[in-house]
Amino acid sequence: METIVKKRIKQVLVGDQDAYAEIVEIYKDKVFLICYRMLGNRHEAEDIAQEAFLRAYVNIHSFNINLKFSSWLYRIATNLCIDRIRKKKPDFYLDAEVAGTEGLTMYSQIAADTSLPEEDVESLELQETIQREISKLPEKYRTVIVLKYIEELSLNEISQILDLPLGTVKTRIHRGREALRTQLRYV
């Protein structure tokens, strides 16, 4: 396919416009799909695809015949799509009033970034359950779990505080997590 296209490009370079029509026929669907996927609008995609073929034709003399024409053409189409996206103005503005309301703006349609009260209650209940289960762990595991996950200390700090080798701290954290995991399965 690429050898046929390169042959047609050489014909275009000497002035054969029909040869370019064959190139367009080969790539028109693929270029349209690229544009459509980027823009999400059929009419804009058709316009940009047409513009891509026009730009390629106008600049065909700058195409390096040793490279793939399809890659060059797709890059032109992609760049045109990016330009269109950057230039496109938004369809709505957040401070615009919502139709049929008095003074209500689009800002009111944005989800709040605060949690719902029931989510807060669930989170507190979960924290209490975990805390209760941590307190049931044997002291040697409970200590390292609290220091690591509640106090957020590093392994080296825990090792120094408890005057234990680093390997022992890692082992106790691992065993403590496993014990906690087992306990939480039955809660």
Image (spheres, rainbow, N blue to C red):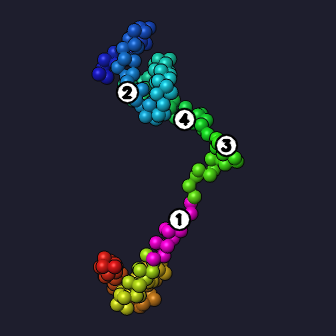
Q: Does the magenta-highlighted stretch encompass residue 140?
A: no
The circle drawn on residue 58 is none
- Judge from the rendering whether residue 39 lies leftward or rightward of residue 33; answer left or right: right
Q: CA distance from mark 3 to mark 4?
A: 22 Å
- Judge from the rendering whether residue 49 lies leftward or rightward of residue 107; answer left or right: left
Quadrant containing the C terminus in the rendered view: bottom left
Give the vertical position of 182 relative to 19 (above or below): below
Q: Is residue 124 visible?
A: yes
| Residue at disc 1, secondary structure | loop
Residue that mark 3 sits on = 96
Residue that mark 4 sits on = 85
121, 171: nearer the viewer: 121
Would you say the magenta stretch is mainly helix, strand or loop? helix
Q: Are marks 1 and 3 in contact (CB under 8 Å)?
A: no
139, 93: nearer the viewer: 93
Residue that mark 2 sits on = 30
Mark with earlier residue (2, 4): 2
| Residue at disc 2, secondary structure | helix
Q: Are marks 3 and 4 in contact (CB under 8 Å)?
A: no
Q: Position of residue 82 (x, y in %)?
A: 52, 34
